[in-house]
Image: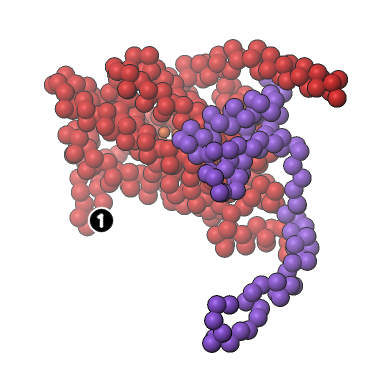
Chain colours: A red, B purple
Amino acid sequence: MSLELQFEETIAHDQRLEPRDWVPDAYRSTMVRMIAQHAHSEIIGMQPEGNWITRAPSLRRKAILLAKVQDEAGHGLYLYSAAETLGADRAELTEKLVTGRQKYSSIFNYPTLTFADVGVIGWLVDGAAICNQVPLCRSSYGPYARAMIRICKEESFHQRQGYELLMTMMRGTEQQRAMVQESVDRWWWPSLMMFGPPDADSSHTAQSMEWKIKRHTNDELRQRFVDMSVPQADALGVTLPDPDLRWNAEREHHDFGEIDWAEFKQVVSGNGPCNAQRVAHRKAAHDEGAWVREAAAAHARKNDERRGSAA
Amino acid sequence: MRSEWPLYEVFVRGKRGLNHVHVGSLHAADDEMALHHARDLYTRRNEGVSIWVVRAADITASSPDEKDPFFAPSGDKVYRHPTFYDIPDDVPHI
Ligand SMILES: [Fe+2]
Ligand SMILES: [Fe+2]
């Protein structure tokens, strides 16, 4: 059987492709681009929330937030590890991120202005990530699918801690309730943009679905997220900032307003409120860590030599 | 900018009585650091009671290209399976 046929049969039978299998170049590059973008999002995603670790209002909230941000670091590393099975080079991926040649999710280019943002990010941003990621647990590339399973297990904690934080604030003072509402108003639309451009404009969706890299279109997942969020907002006692949001009995889904795609394009192409800051911070962390990486490598070399001469 | 830290593959035993299972990889300067990183990265929620790390370069693997011929010796030995043998229904415990 030809390699190409073997590849197609594996996908047709819903089996996973594994690291050493032959795959078409386009599959490999699509997969690397997708995994790298996802890994970068996890790593950059540490920044907006990391911003509040030292100012968390209690030790309990600080411990939770720290654990959550550590998880995001872990997610990034699981994914870089998956990208490397396709032949990507870790140092090169980092370089592409800090030089702006690879993208990350637009959502992390918005600032976290109040502590309520920590709750809203957990609820909506991690919530949207879960919607996106659950179907990816069945993605055709084995190492990616397995990383997603691990990640999804951990995301549930992220969303619940956020929602619980918001419930606590909603039971507090009038001022705290206003702070939650203000935060929801800022994060709702950017969260909807997390699912990517509408299907009609999504250049990669059709091929990715054919290869079973993705299992649902951007618009399907966005609709699912809206439907899930509406009752959660009701239970919380907040209003979602969309006058056109209403139940459509005929479709059995919620209708919702037009997304500002011009804003999305601006943020994706580097002109969001925090793009420059996020990348600069990542680059500084990497540069400032150079001496640690070198020292550890030198130490390992020395130990190796010592062991060699003792033997 | 290029990292000099080699790639390690990580295997975790979930609990006593189970095999070590491959969970992913990481970069580390040496074996000891690999073990510490593996603990921090792959067992943040008690996912394991034992970890193995091994340099990816030290693993020898079968190639998927030769999948069919490589595993062929076991393909035609159906008599290695218990279902190959017909035993009358009225014979108990077998
Ligand atoms: Fe994550
Ligand atoms: Fe998360």
The x and y percentages for residue A284 are 55, 14
Residue at far front of view: B92
The x and y percentages for residue B61 are 74, 48
Residue B72 sits in which quadrant?
bottom right
The x and y percentages for residue A90 are 64, 30
Q: From the viewer's side, name the closer residue of B36 and A231.
A: B36
Residue A185 sits in which quadrant?
top left
In the shown orientation, is residue A124 left or right of residue A37?
Answer: left
Crowding around mark 1 (Cα neighbors within 10 Å: few <14, some 14 to 19, many 20+) is few
Name the subunit of mark 1: A
Question: Which residue bears the numbered disc 1?
Answer: A251
Q: Is residue A54 visible?
A: yes
Q: Residue at x 29, y 18 (%)?
A: A58
The x and y percentages for residue A199 are 42, 47
Q: Residue at x 33, y 43 (%)?
A: A225
Location of the N terminus of chain A by quadrant is bottom right
Q: From the viewer's side, name the closer residue of A291 and A206.
A: A291
Location of the C terminus of chain A by quadrant is top right
* Callout count: 1
Beta carbon at label 1 within 8 Å of ligand 2: no
In the shown orientation, is residue B75 left or right of residue A194?
Answer: right
Which element carries disc 1, helix, strand or loop? loop
Residue type marked 1: Arg
In the shown orientation, is residue B23 left or right of residue A57?
Answer: right
Q: Is residue A31 visible?
A: no
Which quarter is ligand 2 in? top left
Residue A300 sits in which quadrant?
top right
Q: Vertical placement of A27 versus A14: above or below?
A: above
Q: Residue at x 75, y 52 (%)?
A: B63
Q: Vertical placement of A131 versus B42: above or below?
A: below
